[in-house]
Image: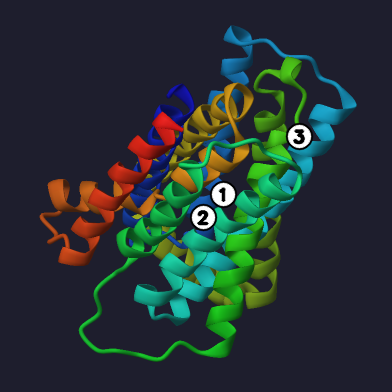
Amino acid sequence: MLTVVLGLAGALVYGAADFFGGLAARRISALRVTALGALSGVVLLTLGTLVVPGRWSPEAVLWGGLSGVTGAAAIALLYACLAIGPMSILSPLTAVTSAIVPLTWGLVTGAQLGAIAYPAFALALVAVVLVGFVPAKEAVRPTLGGLLMATASGVLIGAFYILIDHTPDDSGLVPLVVNRTVNASIMITLIVVLAVIAGRRRAGASAAALRGGWRGGFWLAVGCGLLDAIANIIVLVGLRVGDLTIVSVLTALYPAGTILLAALVLRERIARLQWVGLVLALAASAMLAAA
C-alpha cells in the first residue's frame, strides 16, 4: 500500500514540476529552465543530506552520476521531440515507454508479484496513454525522428529508475545530489557551448531576451527544480521500501499532475479521454494496493 501511495505521490509532484517548468519555458529557454531547476535541486538535496545523512560510497556516486547523465539526455530528447510534435502522440509514447522499461527489467530480474498485479499493470499502461493524451485541433502524423526521440527519451527515463534502484540503501540522498550535480553541469556546459557557437551577436540578443523574461521565468524554474527534487526523493523512498515495477508504472502517470494543475490554475479543459485515464489510473492503483 505504501509503495502505491509513494508512486502516485511521485507522479503528482513530477507533474507539478512539469507544469511550472512549462510556464517558465514560455519566459526563458527550456535549457535555462532545466539548468536552473537542476541547480535549485542540488541546493535542496544538499540541505536534505543534513537531515537524512548517507554514506558517500563509490557505488552511490557511480549510480547517481550515471542517472544524472541519462536524466540530462532524456530531458534534451523530450524537449526536442515535443518541439517537433505532435504532443498528443509523442508525450504519452514517452510516458508509457518510461514505464515499460523498468517494468520489463523488474520482471526479467525476478520480481515476485501477485496474479492481480499483471492486469493492473496493463490497466495502468492504458491509463498512462490516455492521461498523457493532449487533444490537438488538427491530426498530424508524427515523423520518424519524433517517434525515435520520444522512445529514446522514455527508455532513458526508465533507465533512471533502474539506476537509482541500484543505489545502496545506506546512501541516503547522496545519489540524488550526485545526479543533480551532473545534470546541472551538463546543462550549463551545453548552454555555454551553444552561446559560443551562436556568436557574440546572437548571444547578445539572447541575453537581452533573457533579461526581459527573467523575473517571472527565474522563480518558476526554481520552483520546477525544487518540486522535481522532492519527486525524486519520493521515488527513491518508494524504490527502497517497495518494488521497482510498481513505482515506475505509477510514476509514469505524471501527466496527471500537469493536467490537473492546468485545469485549476489556467482553467484548461480536461478532455474526456483524460478523465477516463484518471479513473483507470485509480482503478489500477487500487488493484496494485491489493496485490
Pointer 2 residue:
32
Image position of 97 (left or right of 197): left
Q: Residues within 10 Å of mark 3 (few under 14, many from 20)?
A: some
Pointer 3 residue:
166
| Numbered mark located on residue 35 in the image | 1
Position above or below: 213 against 197 = above
Q: Residues within 10 Å of mark 2 (few under 14, many from 20)?
A: many
Closer-to-camera residue (86/106): 106
Image position of 208 (left or right of 114): left
Position above or below: 46 against 32 = above
Image position of 149 (left or right of 169): left
| Numbered mark located on residue 197 in the image | none
Mark 1 or mark 3, which is nearer the start of the sequence?
A: 1
Image location of residue 215, percent across then percent down: 33, 46
Q: Contact (CB < 8 A) between labels 2 and 1?
A: yes
Amino acid carrying label 1: it is Ala
Q: Across the whole image, how many numbered discs are drawn on residues? A: 3
